[in-house]
Amino acid sequence: MKTLASRHSFKRKILVTGGAGFIASSLAEELAADPDNLVIVMYNLSTGHYKKLPPLADNLRFVKGDVNDYKEIMEVMLSFQFHYVFHYAAVVGVKRTQENPVSVLKDIRGIENICRIGKNTGVRRLFFASSSEVYG
Ligand SMILES: NC(=O)c1ccc[n+]([C@@H]2O[C@H](COP(=O)([O-])OP(=O)(O)OC[C@H]3O[C@@H](n4cnc5c(N)ncnc54)[C@H](O)[C@@H]3O)[C@@H](O)[C@H]2O)c1
């Protein structure tokens, strides 16, 4: 993983979480259109689908893993030393969240992990999508 980042001198190294999902897959594709960006997409397939992943490119790579798992996200963030993080990995949908309230609460770990590791690995800015559940 590290070799990719060190082989090229990308101006911006960007982590996009939840990349097999609705918003993050489009965002990652758009970010990768700029060759100065290295885009790493972290995803799991709890929802979403391989087909939704953005097209592979020289500056876009996938890492399968769980953002809520400290060790998994730490390995990725330590390897790449991202400048920016877009955090979209979450359990989404009113029905799904009502049926799995505990898994929703576990997502708090994801943002906690990213904040904690980001602070120590030089992340300049974190973009957090809040939750669509605020709409009720
Ligand atoms: N869609 C909206 O209108 C809207 C509005 C405001 C906020 N948001 C928020 O934006 C985020 C993304 O929304 P979306 O509509 O693209 O959802 P989505 O369900 O399409 O995508 C979320 C992706 O995250 C993945 N994921 C879930 N938990 C994960 C984990 N622990 N580690 C790694 N990947 C994980 C899922 O597999 C899925 O592919 C959510 O937090 C949502 O609440 C969405």
Image: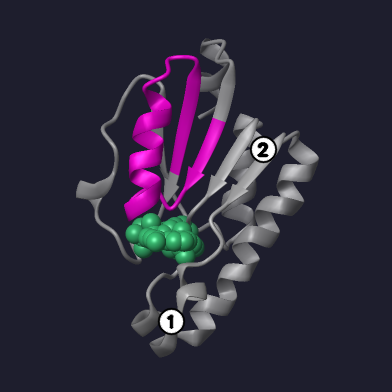
Of pointers 1 and 2, the one earlier in the residue sequence? 2
Amino acid type indicated by mark 2: Leu
Q: Give me the disc on residue 78.
A: 2
Q: Nearer the viewer, residue 93 or 40?
A: 93
Residue at image position (50%, 78%) is 103
Q: In the rendering, at what x and y percent does residue 32 appear? A: 40, 26
Kind of residue sitting beneath label 1: Thr
Q: Is residue 41 placed above or below 66 in the rendered structure? A: above
Mark 1 and ligand 1: say if the CB distance to the nearest ligand atom is below 8 Å. Answer: no
* Quarter occupied by residue 81: top right
- Does the segment drawn in magenta span residue 135? no
Residue at position x 58%, y 61% in the image: 69
Whether pointer 1 and pointer 2 mark residues with C-beta atoms closer than 8 Å, the reply is no
Image coordinates of residue 20 in percent, x first then y, are 33, 51
Residue at figure coordinates x 65%, y 30% from the top left = 83
SS class, disc 1: helix
> Seen in the image, is 78 located left or right of residue 37?
right
Query: Which residue is tagged 1?
Result: 97
Residue 90, visible in the rendered structure: no
Colour convention of the picture: one colour
As drawn, 41 above or below 48: above
Separation (CA) of disc 1 from disc 2? 31 Å
Q: Left or right: where does residue 52 sit relative to residue 86?
A: left
Q: Is residue 105 above or below residue 73?
A: below
Q: Residue furthest right?
A: 120
- Quadrant of the rendered structure where residue 58 is? top left
Label annotation for residue 2: none
Ligand 1 position by quadrant: bottom left
Residue 46: give x, y in percent of width and height.
35, 66
Q: Which residues are magenta?
A: 14-41
